[in-house]
Image (cartoon, rainbow, N blue to C red):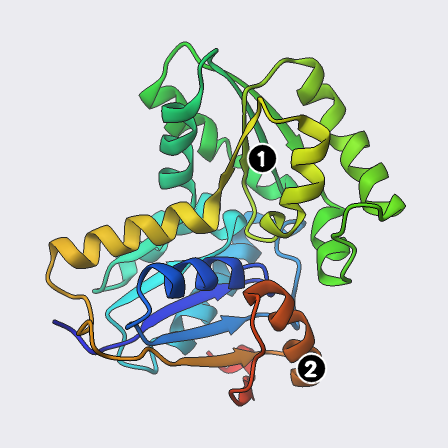
Amino acid sequence: MDHRPIGVFDSGLGGLTAVRELASRMPQENIIYFGDTGRVPYGSRGRETITKYARQDVAFLRTFDLKAVVIACGTVSSTALDALRQEQDIPVFGVVEPTAVRAVELTRNNRIGLIATRATISTGAYERVIWANAPRAQIFPAACPLFVPLVENGRTQPGDVVIETVVRDYLSPLKEAGVDVLVLGCTHYPLLREVIANFMGPEVALVDSGAEVAHQVGRWLAEHDQLAPAEQKGASRWYVSDAQADFRELATRFLGRPVTEPVGKVDIEKY
């Protein structure tokens, strides 16, 4: 057993969907979350900048005695995961591998759609994992740059003409291509699940990157006897690099529960 917390970070608040899944699967675990809200989004940045930011995020989280780090960000997972793993002496989990593997398990026609940020798409990280597990798979990627700001501004509900128009514009080519699995390659996107599912139809399976990485983390901790005691009630601590006041409202939406814990502000450039 291991009482140490799990550290989770994202460029903004999308990673809270991974926190929600971690807490659902392992309610005994303590979680420390950092959202780099002062520099969001990462998806439009270059590789060197993304890697620099990710190193700073991990450096802050490592001021706590962690047992694992979860990169709840598709952009960082596809760009800087290998570098971070080489530099850390605790396990570092990214969202790409478990999500891509799950997509392969679910597809029936080998036509897999992928939506993510431009930075994630440009790395080809999802494609490499999918093709390693299903060489004959056809992958249809689409960058969706407007999704993150729309989610963080609360434009997520069916009937909202703005988000429904953007979803239709981005996803029409994937629907026409006949994909039967759609990878939600950014942890913001699960908040659009209902709108996306309504557009794509019930025959298309949606794969949630936050849920898949939470499953992988839980399995690894169990296999290495590092789960917290089952009787423990897990607690969460929240940190951002900008505007604490906005965090509570948005985090409540992402987590599906009121956020009553204190929210700390971090000068991330110090790390």
State the image coordinates of residue 12 (x, y, percent, origin top left): 60, 65
Q: Bin the neighbour count of mark 2 within 10 Å (Cα to Cα): few under 14, some 14-19, many 20 and up.
A: few
- In the rendered view, tell whether residue 7 sits above or below residue 76: below
- Direction from residue 112 to residue 31 in the image, left or right: left
Question: Residue 223, which numbered label?
Answer: none
- Do the residues bearing badges 1 and 2 touch, measured as CB atoms within 8 Å? no
Residue beneath disc 1: 121
Q: Bin the neighbour count of mark 1 within 10 Å (Cα to Cα): few under 14, some 14-19, many 20 and up.
A: many
State the image coordinates of residue 146 (x, y, percent, origin top left): 76, 47
- Direction from residue 243 to residue 71 in the image, left or right: left
Amino acid beneath label 1? Ile
Quick one: quadrant of the N terminus? bottom left
Residue beneath disc 2: 243
Q: Which residue is pictured at 65% across the width and 35% down the height?
A: 197
Q: How many numbered marks does the figure carry? A: 2
Q: Which residue is pictured at 70% across the width and 34% down the height?
A: 198
Q: Which residue is pictured at 38% across the width and 29% down the height?
A: 129
- In the rendered view, tell whether residue 205 sits above or below residue 11: above
Which of marks 2 and 1 precedes in the sequence? 1
Q: Is residue 161 visible?
A: yes
- Direction from residue 112 to residue 242 in the image, left or right: right
Q: Is residue 143 visible?
A: no
Q: CA distance from mark 1 to mark 2?
A: 29 Å
